[in-house]
Amino acid sequence: MGARDAKTLESLRAENAQLREILAITEDNLRASQEEVLRLSMVDTLTGVFNRRHFMDLADQEVSRARRYKRPLGVLVVVLDNMRAVNQAHGTERGDAVLGVMGAAIMRALRTADIVGRTAGATFAVLLPETERDGTVALAERLVLEMAQAAADLLKDAPPLPTVSLGATHVVREDVIFDAVLRRADEAVARARHAGGRQAVYLAADDLPA
């Protein structure tokens, strides 16, 4: 092999190495893009918690697991009562920021195994695996206070401030699907609102008329 051929071969090897490096970077970028697309399909970008669709999928799985293994599963529905007034007084951009800090306040209070999603405009839902009634109620009452404080800090106590009504319940054997549990938690929210809001109400399955 002549010197010219050897030089050409070395050049080809260098080009191949460069192409392999470019290909590896491209594959890494593609993988990262796919992971980001998957994440965005599951997460509510405004608040950072799961979106309704993904949360409901997880909820059905958790209800099935709780019923199958007879394990406790607490459920919370958290509603910001007066976000329309907040948006009108402070602007929608500030209102969106309120939703963001509310989502963050919920996540700070939860364990790794707990699950939170934004299920409507100003509504969040939380799943609490392996949590009995006392623990569920304690967390619910804590969230009412901590979320109100987070909003007040953001808005620098300028009225109107968002208030929190929270409904809590537990999955029971008769709850074949999550929608049944959600309806009970929604009824608990309605009772909290009827009592003036700014509070949590726990509603067990046997608290409702048959």
Image (cartoon, rainbow, N blue to C red):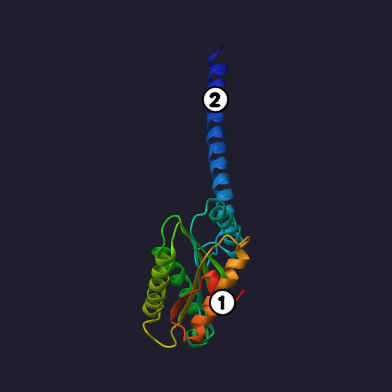
Count neighbours of disc 2 (C-alpha within 10 A) and say few if under 14, some if 14 to 19, many if 20 or more.
Answer: few
Residue beneath the point at 57% across and 25% down:
12
The mark closer to the camera, 1 or 2, is 1
Q: Name the foreground residue: 193 vs 82.
A: 193
The x and y percentages for residue 198 are: 43, 82
Horizontal arrangement in the rendering, residue 199 relative to residue 61 (left or right): left
Can you tell which mark lies on residue 156? none
Establish if 73 lies above or below 3: below
Q: Is residue 16 something that shows in the picture?
A: yes
Q: Which residue is mark 2?
A: 13
The x and y percentages for residue 102 are: 45, 72
Residue beneath the point at 42% across and 88% down:
159
Establish if 198 lies above or below 23: below
Q: Using the rendered view, name the quadrant where residue 180 is placed.
A: bottom right
The x and y percentages for residue 84 are: 54, 84
Count neighbours of disc 1 (C-alpha within 10 A) and say few if under 14, some if 14 to 19, many if 20 or more.
Answer: many
Q: Is residue 81 something that shows in the picture?
A: no
The kind of residue tagged 2 is Arg
The x and y percentages for residue 156 are: 36, 82
Q: Furthest residue to the top? A: 1
Picture mark count:
2
For the C terminus, give its image quadrant. Answer: bottom right
Q: Name the foreground residue: 97 vs 15.
A: 97
Establish if 12 lies above or below 6: below
For the N terminus, give its image quadrant. Answer: top right
Residue beneath the point at 58% across and 45% down:
30
Of the residues under marks 1 and 2, which one precedes in the sequence? 2
- Measure the C-alpha gap from mark 1 to mark 2: 71 Å
The kind of residue tagged 1 is Glu
Q: Which residue is mark 1?
A: 187
